[in-house]
Image (cartoon, rainbow, N blue to C red):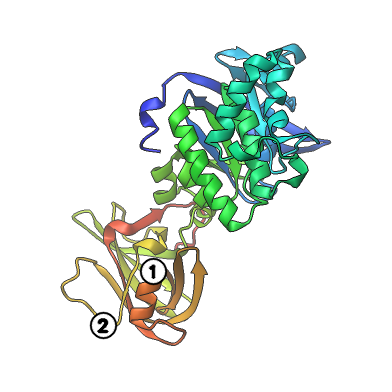
Amino acid sequence: PTGRAALMSRERILEARDLLVHRGATRVLDIPELDLRVGEVLALMGPNGAGKTTLMLTLAGLLAPTAGSVLFRGSALQAKGDREAFRRRTTMVFQDPLLFDATVAQNIAAGLKLRGLSAHERKPRVTAWAERLGLGSLLDRPARQLSGGEAQRTALARAFVLNPEILFLDEPFAALDPQAREGLIGDLGHLLAETGTTAVIATHDQGEATRLAHRLAVMREGRILQRGGLRKVTNHPEDPFVAAFVGMETLLKGQVTECREGLLTLRIRKGTGNGEVVALGEAEPGQTALVGVRPEHVSLSLHSDNTSSARNAFPGAVTKVIPRGPFFKVELDCGFFLAAFVTAQSLSELGLRPGCPVVASFKATSVHLIRKEGLAPEL
């Protein structure tokens, strides 16, 4: 995202206002406000059934809202003709590539042909985008003979060759094997950065979103719970559901016992144990909050380290070790639940396995507090 920042504009290319979508009598989408800037990549995140695809189809002009409006460059897409004209300036890639029974080259060229470009005009553009997506040697291959990754690359080439003003991507990697998925995410990120293409991607995978997007919008039951910059949403979630969904594995209820010079001490209770966590912030003794700590901010050692700058250190025992891509998630019982990420090397050097005693530590700056109405005043 940092490299793409220079390509972004403050100009709003797409806006949603008071958007409602009903399925029968049931309201399935309720979006008071959403905007997309030129050159920006926005990720719609949420579990299955959160409304991501419904919102994307509505933004793409493929689904008419029950109420509210979608604006493209300041003009509302009100009539059917408005939406059709808008769709000719955008394109969409689905989880299923939806390729024609034709060659790779013919599939990539399909949109250009529909727009009236001659074979002479189509060929260099098709060849260029095939090369950029690693399909140069497959142009004459029938689409039915492609692997899943090759088919999705063809679908992306068919989209990019149109030079769309907005690219919509609906769970484009969900059906791919890990190796194909990893390569395609990397290539798509480079292409979005190089071209400055404005894009909206729907995904339930935090890793995809953080690698591709400038901003996140976390959805649940047809609503956006939080939206904002990548770091803000992942490190400062405003809602327990958002916190858990963006990977804040540890969420504990805490009660402020002391506030001194910007440092809070909170008493926490989880399971059978109690503990005190030190965090940055301002609050009054007796106030409650959820205490969140991301697993990558937790360090593990076999002994207490008196030289560490971490204000929070808890002895505990490993309860579970779970592979997580290039890392391992280590779940701990410190009298309360705590999770940490470690590398394979650290896992081996520390000899981490269920039952192993460890000391978990994290800095006060790593603690995030979610003030949520409805928390019990007493723990």
For the residues carrying marks 2 and 1, which lies nearer the camera in this image? 1
Q: Which mark is residue 343?
A: 1
Are circles 2 and 1 on residues that touch, CB within 8 Å?
no
Q: Quadrant of residue 62?
A: top right
Q: Residues within 10 Å of mark 2 (few under 14, many from 20)?
A: few
The residue under label 2 is which amino acid type? His
Query: What x and y, as percent, mark residue 226?
Result: 51, 42
Mark 2 and mark 1: span between their CA atoms? 18 Å
| Position of 251 relative to 214 (above/below) | below
Looking at the image, residue 113 sits to the left or right of residue 212; the answer is: right
Give whichever of discs 2 and 1 has the lower sequence position. 2
Q: Which residue appears at 56% of the width and 56% of the height?
A: 179
Q: Residues within 10 Å of mark 1 (few under 14, many from 20)?
A: some
Looking at the image, residue 104 sits to the left or right of residue 165; the answer is: right
The residue under label 1 is which amino acid type? Thr
Q: Which mark is residue 218?
A: none
| Position of 75 relative to 52 (above/below) | above
Q: Which residue appears at 68% of the width and 31% of the height?
A: 105
Q: Quadrant of residue 127?
A: top right
| Position of 15 relative to 254 (above/below) | above
Q: Which residue appears at 50% of the width and 42% of the height?
A: 187
Using the rendered image of the protein, determine whether residue 166 is visible from the camera's viewpoint: yes
Q: Which residue is mark 2?
A: 303
For the residue labelled by badge 1, is the local secondary structure a helix, a strand or a loop? strand
Q: Nearer the viewer, residue 317 or 225?
A: 317
